[in-house]
Amino acid sequence: MHPTQLSSSIEQYCQYLTERNYARASVEGRLYALRAFVRWCENRGIYLAEEVDTQDLLDYREYLDNYRKKDGDPLGDACKSHGIATIRNFLFYLVRSGRLEENPGKNITVPRAKKVKKNRGTTEEIMEAILESIDTESLYGLRDRAILETLYSTGIRRMELCNLHLYDLDISQGTLTIRQGKGKKDRVVPIGQRALFWTELYLSMVRPYLVRSLEEPALFLSRLGRPLSKERLWSLVSQYIKTVTGKSAGCHLFRHTAATLMLSNGADIRFIQQFLGHRHLSTTETYTPVSFAKLQESYLKAHPASKGG
């Protein structure tokens, strides 16, 4: 058995995942975690997979527990769990491919991430305030209004918006096609008249100014005429949210708010599942506790047996 270099084998592992249709974001996340582990190993003179033993993995888990980010905060439980689980799966891959005799991490427990109830959205009033805060007298403000209106109207994910092409928008039918969304599945969602209004303004007044090549297919463009990166999109969206609310949040605030308000206003949960592109209904059902409060309020007002006799 030939020695297995850690640095080169993680690239091969990620290529293996890509060939098996793992989402790009998932592969990139695993690659990031593995590169951090390899750097830690190399700083300790460990360059080969065969040199990694169980104690090294226990030491690395302790390292993650004690690690502090630039702002002084520790790593989150989910981040630590992802790091250890990724390393274990990587070592299992090396065993299955015949490059390692035994996985030193097979008995290493993965720390369970604590389930934290997420902020699923905000109110309609705050959402309107965020949208109205955008200066639409400027070209970039017009673009940003179209972007935020699209996020709110369609509930699409950040990466899905970055990947939108001109031909994905059907103005006459009032639809938006999301291609290769999460799970590499396509879906078609409705887009509201207000989002269409701002997007048409962007297409006629802003995009021609930004575009550098007539062959550029991306719907929303950066100042350099390129498709928006997910990092740039998060930055501009979070800036508008923080200006109004004083809190940090990203594109998912629009997604969560759209889903919560639709459920509260009577939309069927199976439609919401299709709208959001959830593979499992159980994922969509995480929104139901919010709408249950609305149900309980209606019950107390309307049901004759809801009050004491």
Image (spheres, helix red, strand yellow):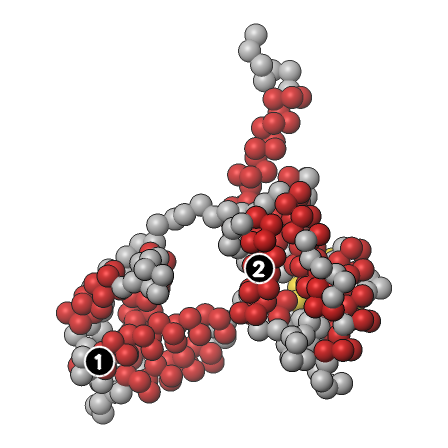
Residue situated in front as seen by the camera: 102 or 200: 200
Q: Looking at the image, which residue sits at the far right?
A: 172
Label 2 environment density (alpha carbons within 10 Å; few <14, some 14–19, many ≥20): some
- Residue positioned 43% across, 77% down in the render: 17
**SS type, badge 1:** loop
At label 2, which amino acid type do we have? Gln
Tag shown at residue 43: 1
Residue farthest to the bottom? 2
Q: Are discs 2 and 1 less than 8 Å apart at CB? A: no
Residue beneath the point at 28% across and 70% down: 88
Nearer to us: label 2 or label 1? 2
Give the answer, above or below, for where 270 lies relative to 292: below
> Which mark, by number, is residue 290?
none
Image x and y of residue 52, in percent = 19, 77
Which is nearer the eye, 15 or 131? 131
- Residue drawn at (17%, 72%) of the image: 56
Q: Is residue 34 above or below residue 280?
A: below
Q: Is residue 282 above or below residue 171?
A: above
Q: Quadrant of the C terminus?
A: top right
Q: Amino acid at mark 1?
A: Asn
Q: Which x, y percent locates residue 101?
A: 20, 80
Q: Quadrant of the N terminus?
A: bottom left
Work out whether residue 272 or residue 245 is closer to the camera in this orientation and state it: 245
Q: Is residue 32 visible?
A: yes
Number of numbered discs visible in the structure rendering: 2
Q: Is residue 268 above or below residue 55?
A: above
Which label's residue is closer to the chain start, 2 or 1? 1
Q: Which mark is residue 239?
A: 2
Which residue occupies 21% across, 63% down?
Answer: 62
Question: Local crowd at mark 1 within 10 Å, few (<14), some, or many (≥20)?
Answer: few
Task: Decide if residue 90 is on the left or right side of residue 230.
Answer: left
Whole-Å distance between the Cαs marked 2 and 1?
38 Å
